[in-house]
Image (tube, rainbow, N blue to C red):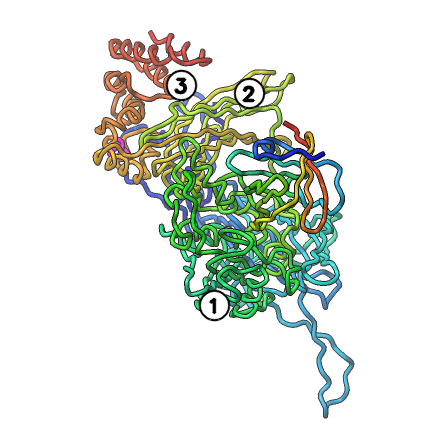
């Protein structure tokens, strides 16, 4: 049963779990910071990720909006259960991150 | 005992720098004039190419029993020798492989000059063939292919067709500074680009075809080249030493690349042309070696479906209204200015992936003039302002989106162009930061600037590889051949965390072996050791380099540093090759590099410190600061001492008369007066008077002052006074037992 997601639940570092090929363009790790900023990182350095750095906004417990690498604001369906945050993008690609800290 | 002593211009090692600065001196009739290093100055850097200049003769060998001779002044040899260097800028490049008469490649070689020498890269495009048509009335001839002529050198930087792009040259070896010879070895890797089938949005792949060298010799340039003396040719050899082709390179432009930025807008939107403080597109281009031309074009675009534009509408407008569209003939980036954008608040690189319309990626971007800046604290001076009227951040956004169009991604390492506006605004809330948008750094992060200068054409040019092509898989020339020194930690700390405008900045250096094994390291971190150089980043993001003004190469400059052992030194910074290092108030970052040769490879370790420079406290302070900052000889006087650099001494005296600057210059004057010069004797009483409690001194300066007092004869009272003051200063030092011991030894 998905839990209700609040902004402070996002703060901290997240790592991408096993993911489908369609999720390759999303970063290996993700860090949500205060004041609505995030940083995404992929290995090796220089690897492109659609979420590199920018802003996020939790529109409601099921929708998270992030600014992307080309500065577009994109809204994703999200669900949160225990320490696992699952995204579904506009193409239907589903992938998840696990809270590290 | 120094093996050699030579004078090198501060921050410069080019021959031209050595020969042009002429400090104003008083006549020297002193018998020790031959001991005075030749004060040369680097201000300002000289235009290329380097003139042909004479060089000093080798130094005479000291004779036993005689005072060692010093190298200055020395007679110039006759006939004069010639220095040559690789001129900075863009070269027209041609490569003809051996045994393939119908294959030739044209392109450019970009040579960037910087404090560490040269970084170069190149791109090659295959020249097209034509088949001569058979003409009626003439005897039939076999179909005969013919190579078209190459790009004209008189036309400047060539723009070649994307479809003919073949190779990136990753230059690994080039003449870093200058030579008295007539040739140098160019080393490079040839990376072949194979475009994926289909549209440009499908990208391509890189294959390294190997390492090559070419002994490039200067020759007279053929007709059409703007500089007859900057033309070189050489045979290209593969790693087996076999000649595989012929390479020519002729200088054609001081810029590395050229592009046009076309700005189209709706009538209600402002054109982003500058930041309101002197930075415009030309300045942006100059900062990265790009010749950027702005084409302000349409100013009356019609809004297709209300004031907010979708990505598709942006793209359609670009295709419809762009003045030129042949990306194989011009690098043209399109900036669309509209009131609002559907997909974001301020700006977007809507043409990111090439799948959005005509399958050509990275042709254009858009910015929104009618976004209202939030009223929260981080937005500083532009809270609640309509974005198009916030000149500085509005222009910054246009530069940022154009950076995306040039293939760059976000970079949050500094407040430069490729960081996001939100992050920069948030950074303005950090302690010590300027208020947004004054905290905007008007430059690219060094990594991004390097990409814009040296990443392959096909990556950066509009319509090339799609946005999202990995940096990690795209070849790029190395800046130099340095290895990171693992296990050696360089700690840089400022003697004082802040200093008034106009004061020199004193730093302490400590190089520590953090490993459990002994490691080779330089024996000295003195600026005279030749191992230390660095750069300073000012509050606006401008980077200025510094390096030794006097270089003394020791006989045994390397030591084996024991585990956990460290060596210490201090440095005093004031000017570099680009002028004053700390010319304005604000936060500075000083990065110091210690580098040395180890088995033919340059090894480097770096450290940095932050320093705050405070504003002028009053008009008198401002005047004194202006005097020392604008007088190049201030630094020379600081370094070499002596009475001969009257401009420098005058500037330092101006600083001494100012109560704010006096503590920062008192030791410099004390050192000068504490050393004899010509017939003038050392004046320890003057030294004692100058070294009051307020005087700012680094540990190395305390030691030097102690050595002065210790070794100068006479005036015991003054020596005691100096000893007392220095003991007081040394008492606060931690870990500088050697300095304390020298101070204690003053009798």
Residue B408 in the image: above or below residue B318: above
Helix, strand or loop status at disc 3? helix
Residue shown at the point (58%, 24%) measured from the top left: B488
Where is residue B595 drawn, in percent x and y?
55, 31
Say which residue label 3 marks.
B699
Residue shown at the point (25%, 32%) measured from the top left: B617
Disc 3 + disc 1, Cβ < 8 Å: no
The answer, for residue B66, to whether it is visible in the render is: yes
Where is residue B452 drawn, in percent x and y?
55, 51
Figure quadrant of residue B441: top left
Say which residue label 1 marks.
B301
Where is residue B97 drawn, in percent x and y?
71, 60
Residue shown at the point (31%, 26%) measured from the top left: B664
User: Callout 2: few (<14), some (14-19), or many (20+) C-alpha neighbours within 10 Å?
Assistant: many
Structural distance between the alpha carbons of marks 1 and 2: 63 Å
The answer, for residue B227, to whether it is visible in the render is: no
Say which residue label 2 marks.
B512
Q: Chain of mark 3?
A: B
**Residue B649 among magenta residues:** yes
Magenta highlight range: B648-652
Helix, strand or loop for the magenta stretch, by majority:
helix
- In the image, which is nearer the foreground, mark 3 or mark 1? 1
Q: Which mark is residue B326?
A: none
Where is residue B200 drawn, in percent x and y?
68, 61
């Amino acid at each position: 049963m998905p839990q209700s997601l609040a902004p402070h639940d996002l703060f901290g570092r997240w790592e991408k779990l096993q993911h489908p090929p369609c999720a390759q363009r999303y970063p290996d790790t993700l860090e949500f910071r205060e004041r609505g900023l995030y940083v995404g990182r992929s290995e090796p350095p220089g690897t492109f990720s659609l979420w590199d750095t920018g802003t996020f906004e939790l529109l409601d417990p099921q929708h998270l909006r992030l600014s992307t690498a080309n500065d577009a604001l994109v809204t994703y369906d999200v669900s949160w259960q225990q320490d696992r945050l699952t995204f579904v993008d506009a193409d239907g690609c589903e992938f998840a991150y696990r809270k590290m800290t | 005992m120094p093996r050699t002593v030579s004078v090198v211009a501060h921050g410069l090692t080019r021959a031209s720098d050595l020969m042009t600065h002429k400090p104003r001196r008083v006549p020297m009739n002193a018998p020790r004039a031959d001991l005075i290093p030749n004060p040369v100055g680097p201000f300002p850097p000289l235009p290329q190419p380097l003139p042909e200049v004479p060089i000093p003769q080798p130094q005479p060998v000291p004779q036993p029993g005689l005072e060692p001779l010093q190298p200055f002044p020395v007679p110039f040899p006759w006939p004069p020798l010639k220095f040559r260097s690789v001129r900075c800028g863009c070269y027209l490049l041609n490569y003809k492989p051996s045994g393939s008469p119908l294959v030739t490649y044209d392109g450019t070689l970009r040579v960037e000059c910087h404090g560490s020498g040269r970084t170069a890269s190149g791109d090659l495009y295959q020249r097209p063939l034509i088949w001569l048509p058979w003409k009626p009335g003439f005897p039939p001839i076999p179909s005969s292919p013919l190579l078209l002529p190459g790009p004209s050198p008189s036309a400047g930087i060539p723009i070649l067709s994307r479809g003919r792009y073949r190779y990136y040259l990753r230059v690994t070896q080039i003449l870093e500074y200058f030579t008295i010879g007539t040739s140098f070895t160019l080393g490079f890797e040839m990376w072949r680009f194979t475009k994926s089938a289909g549209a440009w949005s499908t990208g391509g792949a890189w294959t390294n075809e190997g390492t090559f060298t070419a002994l490039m010799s200067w020759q007279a340039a053929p007709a059409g080249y703007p500089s007859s003396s900057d033309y070189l040719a050489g045979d290209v050899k593969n790693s087996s030493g076999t000649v595989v082709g012929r390479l020519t390179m002729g200088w054609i432009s001081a810029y590395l690349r050229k592009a046009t930025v076309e700005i189209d807008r709706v009538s209600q939107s402002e054109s982003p042309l500058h930041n309101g403080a002197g930075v415009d597109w030309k300045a942006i281009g100059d900062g990265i070696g790009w010749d950027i031309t702005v084409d302000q074009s349409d100013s009356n675009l019609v809004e297709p479906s209300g004031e907010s534009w979708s990505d598709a509408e942006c793209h359609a407008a670009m295709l419809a209204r762009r003045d030129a569209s042949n990306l194989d003939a011009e690098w043209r980036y399109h900036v669309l200015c509209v009131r609002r954008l559907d997909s974001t608040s301020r700006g977007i690189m809507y043409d990111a992936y090439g799948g959005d319309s005509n399958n050509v990626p990275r042709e254009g971007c858009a910015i929104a003039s009618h976004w209202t800046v939030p009223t929260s604290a981080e937005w500083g001076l532009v809270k609640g302002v309509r974005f198009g009227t916030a000149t500085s951040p509005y222009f910054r956004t246009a530069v940022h989106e154009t950076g995306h169009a040039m293939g760059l991604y976000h970079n949050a390492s500094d407040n430069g162009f490729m960081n996001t506006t939100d992050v920069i605004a948030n950074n303005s809330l950090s302690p010590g930061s300027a208020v947004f948008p004054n905290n905007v750094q008007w430059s690219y992060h060094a990594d991004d600037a390097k990409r814009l200068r040296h990443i392959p054409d096909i990556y950066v040019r509009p319509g090339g590889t799609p946005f999202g092509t990995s940096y990690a898989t795209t070849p790029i020339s190395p800046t130099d051949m340095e290895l990171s020194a693992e296990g050696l930690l360089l700690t840089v700390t400022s003697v004082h965390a802040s200093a008034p405008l106009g004061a020199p900045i004193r730093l302490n250096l400590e190089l520590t072996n953090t490993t459990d094994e002994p490691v080779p390291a330089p024996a000295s971190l003195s600026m005279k050791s030749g191992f230390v150089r660095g750069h300073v980043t000012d509050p606006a993001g401008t980077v200025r380099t510094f390096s030794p003004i006097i270089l003394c190469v020791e006989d045994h400059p390397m030591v084996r540093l024991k585990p956990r052992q460290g060596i210490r030194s201090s440095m005093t910074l004031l000017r570099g090759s680009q002028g004053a290092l700390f010319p304005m108030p604000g936060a500075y970052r000083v990065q110091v590099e210690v580098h040395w040769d180890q088995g033919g490879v340059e090894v480097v370790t770096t450290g940095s410190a932050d320093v705050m420079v405070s504003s002028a406290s009053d008009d008198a302070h401002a005047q004194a600061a202006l005097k020392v900052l604008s007088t190049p000889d201030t630094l020379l006087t600081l370094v070499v001492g002596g009475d001969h650099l009257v401009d420098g001494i005058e500037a330092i005296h101006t600083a001494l008369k100012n109560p704010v600057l006096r503590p920062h210059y008192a030791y410099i004057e004390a050192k000068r007066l504490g050393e004899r010069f010509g017939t003038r004797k050392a004046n320890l009483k003057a030294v004692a008077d100058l070294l009051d409690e307020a005087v700012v001194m680094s540990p190395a300066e305390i030691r030097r002052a102690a050595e002065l007092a210790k070794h100068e004869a006479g005036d015991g009272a003054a020596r005691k006074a100096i000893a007392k003051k220095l003991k007081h200063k040394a008492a606060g030092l931690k870990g500088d037992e050697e300095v304390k011991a020298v101070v204690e030894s003053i009798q």
